[in-house]
Image (cartoon, grey):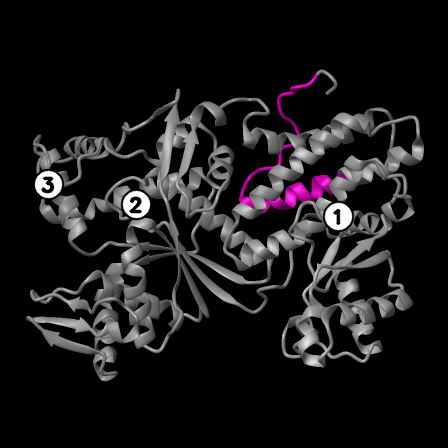
């Protein structure tokens, strides 16, 4: 890739100028090279290497920059047009248009693997997300965490990590007792207790149970949570998510893992007894207060089970743990991390907190669910829109922001619908290929095709976006931000639609037609790659919006 070629040229220029690398132990020797963040900047890449070296060599940064530029001019690496010194010593690198043709060729060579890299090669990541209590349907907010979690797993894997998707079943504890009490009440034709579960799904469950039995024991009602789990699995299947492991909290208790973790904490001297309870000295590890591990009635807290669970993940060979939780659990993050540090596992787990979703229709907030009553469920949304629409909508913005899901917008078959807008770009490219075939036009091999005719501003814009895509995927993985891929997809679709309107692909100019056919194919491959990371289909055909289609 062009960035690697430029990095090699920069290292050669530093060597020729008698300058060291800023940090020999760091990646690329500490030489940072990236597209400029200022949209007004017209350079293709920029680096602050001269500023980093100024203190090392005792020379003003602009003088260091001048020495590097002199050597780059002498080396004349492929595609380099010129280098400018800006501000206190930045090097702004401008490339000849020929490099963009190499970008398009690179996309075609990699196919739908374009954008994949090795940023996280060697990492074995356990990614736990959703883990909704098996006492009711998945709510809309958790549906958002499903989309983000699954896309994040794809993005991490695209950067070389081995990723394991895991769902933690809270099938032990008082919530199942509350569930059983609520279901028994419904079975007996009564209202659940005030603190119980009141969703319509319990009424349906009770009706099914009454159809096959005359009595329902508390234990049988408790075990009916498995029916809820089956419904959760169905919702996950509808949105296209599969977990590698469904881990049972009950197993932790049955196998003695919870008791073993408590014993280890005692051996490490980080617990104490007070008021009839067992406490973790979590304040020794940065937590605002100490936390209860075993209550005065002898029952373990969720924290103790969570510690056992996360230790189990590490014992299974995963080298890093990532959890996606609802923001309402933010107070539990530090206590878990403190406990894991006390057990010798600092910086585990990494926790991402997700905000909730507001469902809108007709400009008004949708408040009631036909299944759960007081919450909107994922199934409610999937009854309105297909999985692609749900997933991409959930991925439009960062998970740590509150999101508004407007049903009126996402159900439109129009360019105002961001999901339709993106998918239609891929369908348009596929339609170009079909029309070419109908006219008897065959693409020549790309290595035999001259891409020099691609000089239109719209074409340059597309090729620059293609060049940025690998960095976008790498950033999305490192920053745990799959919505960055979504942002790239939306911007890229906009660029392609602009190109489509202004640059006819099939023309009387044979050379231009061949070049544009390959540019269109490169765009299709990159779009397909990005949509695959987001878990969204890239359709070849959709309802046509324009007469010229």
* Cα–Cα gap, marks 2 and 1: 54 Å
Q: In the displayed structure, would residue 241 be above or below residue 27?
A: above
Judged from the image, the secondary structure of the residue bearing numbered disc 3 is: loop
Q: In the image, which residues are magenta?
A: 521-546
Q: Where is residue 297 in the image (x, y as percent from the top left)?
A: 7, 65
Relative horizontal placement of residue 113, taking residue 520 as reference (left or right)? left
Residue 20 falls in image quadrant: bottom right
Can residue 262 be seen here?
A: yes
Can residue 430 be seen here?
A: no
Relative horizontal placement of residue 22, taking residue 19 as reference (left or right)? left
Mark 3 highlights which residue? 216
Write the residue at 32% across / 71% down: 340
Mark 2 highlights which residue? 229
Residue 216 falls in image quadrant: top left
Mark 1 highlights which residue? 42
Which one is in front in this view, the residue at disc 2 or the one at disc 1?
1
Write the residue at 83% across / 76% down: 17
Q: In the displayed structure, would residue 313 be above or below residue 151?
A: below
Q: Position of residue 8 (x, y in %)?
A: 78, 69
The front one of 59 and 117 is: 59
Q: Earlier in the sequence, mark 3 or mark 1?
A: 1
Q: Which of marks 2 and 1 is nearer the N terminus?
A: 1
Q: Are marks 2 and 3 in contact (CB under 8 Å)?
A: no
């Amino acid at each position: 890739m062009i960035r690697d070629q430029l990095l090699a040229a920069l290292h050669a220029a530093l060597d020729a100028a008698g300058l060291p690398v800023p940090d020999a132990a760091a990646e690329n020797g500490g030489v940072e090279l990236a597209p400029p963040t200022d949209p007004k900047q017209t350079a293709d890449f920029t680096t602050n290497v001269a500023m980093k070296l100024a203190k090392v060599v005792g020379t003003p940064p602009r003088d260091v920059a001048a020495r590097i530029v002199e050597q780059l001019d002498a080396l004349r690496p492929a595609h380099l047009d010129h280098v400018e010194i800006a501000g206190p010593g930045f090097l702004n690198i401008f490339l000849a248009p020929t490099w963009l043709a190499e970008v398009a060729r690179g996309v075609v060579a990699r196919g739908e693997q374009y954008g994949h890299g090795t940023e996280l090669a060697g990492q074995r990541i356990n990614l736990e997300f959703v883990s909704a209590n098996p006492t009711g349907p998945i709510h809309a907010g958790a549906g958002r965490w499903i989309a983000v979690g699954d896309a994040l797993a794809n993005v991490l894997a695209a950067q070389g990590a081995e990723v394991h998707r895991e769902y933690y079943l809270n099938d032990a504890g008082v919530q199942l007792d509350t569930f059983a009490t609520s279901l028994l009440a419904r079975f007996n034709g009564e209202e659940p207790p005030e603190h119980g579960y009141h969703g319509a799904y319990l009424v349906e469950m009770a009706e099914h149970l009454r159809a096959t039995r005359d009595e329902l024991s508390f234990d049988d009602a408790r075990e009916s949570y498995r029916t809820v789990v089956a419904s959760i699995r169905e919702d996950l299947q509808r949105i296209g998510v599969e977990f590698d492991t469904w881990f049972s909290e009950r197993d932790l208790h049955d196998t003695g893992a919870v008791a073993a973790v408590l014993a280890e904490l005692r051996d490490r001297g980080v617990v104490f007894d007070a008021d009839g309870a067992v406490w973790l000295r979590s304040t020794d590890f940065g937590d605002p207060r100490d936390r209860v591990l075993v209550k005065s009635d002898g029952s373990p807290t969720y924290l103790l089970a969570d510690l056992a669970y996360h230790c189990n993940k590490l014992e299974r060979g995963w080298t890093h743990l990532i959890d996606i939780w609802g923001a309402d659990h933010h107070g539990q993050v530090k206590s878990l991390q403190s406990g894991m540090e006390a057990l010798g596992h600092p910086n585990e787990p990494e926790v991402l907190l997700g905000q909730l979703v507001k469902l809108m229709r007709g400009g008004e907030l949708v408040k009631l669910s036909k299944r759960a009553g007081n919450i909107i469920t994922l199934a409610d949304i999937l009854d309105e829109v297909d999985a692609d629409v749900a997933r991409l909508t959930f991925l439009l913005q960062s998970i740590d922001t509150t999101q508004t899901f407007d049903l009126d917008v996402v159900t439109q078959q129009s360019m105002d619908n961001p999901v339709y807008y993106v998918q239609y770009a891929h369908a348009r490219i596929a339609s170009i290929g079909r029309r070419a075939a109908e006219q008897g036009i065959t693409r020549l091999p790309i290595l035999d095709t001259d891409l020099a005719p691609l000089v239109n501003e719209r074409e340059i814009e597309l090729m620059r976006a293609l060049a940025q895509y690998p960095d976008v995927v790498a950033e999305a993985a490192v920053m745990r931000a799959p919505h960055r891929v979504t942002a790239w997809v939306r911007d890229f679709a906009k660029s392609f639609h602009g190109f489509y309107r202004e640059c006819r692909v099939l023309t009387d100019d044979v050379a231009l037609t061949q070049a544009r056919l390959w540019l269109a194919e490169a765009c299709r491959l990159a779009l397909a790659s990005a949509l695959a990371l987001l878990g969204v289909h890239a359709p070849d055909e959709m309802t046509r919006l324009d007469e010229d289609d």
